[in-house]
Amino acid sequence: MDYLLQHPGTVAWRTLQHIELVAAALAIACAIAFPLGVVVARKRRIGGIILAALNAIYTIPSLALFALLIPLLGIGTWTALVALVLYAQMLLVRNVAVGLRGVSPALIDAARGLGMSAAQIFWRVEVPQALPVIVGGVRLASIALISLATLASWIDAGGLGALVLYGLQHDDPSRAVAGALAAAVLAIVADVGLRRLQHRWE
C-alpha cells in the first residue's frame, strides 16, 4: 500500500495501460467471436471443429503462448494483444452459440408467422433473446483478460503487470502489491458492471 500512496500517478498510468490493452483485445475478440459463434450454433459439425481448435488454444499456458508468438510478432503490445484475443475466443464463441441455441423455437415460429425474414428473425428475435448469455461470456472473458494481461509485462507490453514484475525482481513487495491490488479492483469492477448489464437484459 505504501507504493500506491506514494506514487498514485504511476499506478494510475499503468492502470490506464492495462485498461487500454484489455479493452482493445476484448473489442477485437468480440468482433471475431460473434460470427464464429453463429457458425457454431448453426453448423454443428463445423462448430465442433471450431470449438475443438479454440479449446486447444485455451489450454495452452499463457506464457507458453506468448513465447510461441514472439518469433512471429516480436516482443511488445502486439504480441500481447494477439494472445489475449486468442484466449478470449473460447469463452465468447461458446456463449454466443449457447445463447442462440437456447432461443425458443416457438418464438422463431411466431416471428415467421408474422412475415419476418430470416435476417429480421435473427436480429430482432434471436440476438435479443441470446443477449444475456452473450453478455455473460463477455463478463467472463473480460475478467480472464484482466488477469492474463498482468503477465503481458513479461514481454514488455506494460500494464499493471509491470509493477508486479518489477516488485518481484527487485524485492519491492509494496510495488508488487500495488499492481496486484489495482488489477484485482479492475476485475471486480468489470464483473459487477457487466453482471448488472447481464441482469438488465434477462
Image (spheres, helix red, strand yellow):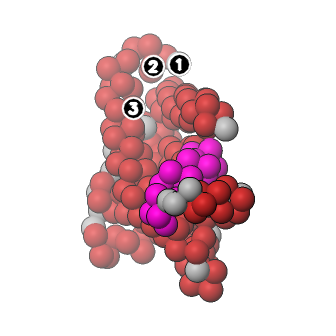
- Residue picked out by circle 2: 4
Q: Nearer the viewer, residue 54 or 104?
A: 104
Coordinates of residue 21 in the picture (x, y in percent): 36, 46
SS state under label 1? loop
Is 41 drawn above or below residue 4 in the view shown?
below
- Residues shaded magenta: 117-135
Q: CA distance from mark 1 to mark 2?
A: 5 Å
Is 151 drawn above or below residue 198 in the view shown?
below
Q: Quadrant of residue 158?
A: top left
- Residue picked out by circle 1: 1
Q: What residue appears at the point 52 percent right and 74 percent down from the top-left corner? A: 39
Q: Residues within 10 Å of mark 3 (few under 14, many from 20)?
A: many
Please identify the dominant SS of the magenta region: helix
Q: What residue appears at the point 44 percent right and 13 percent down from the top-left corner? A: 5
Coordinates of residue 33 in the picture (x, y in percent): 47, 63
Q: Which mark is residue 15?
A: 3
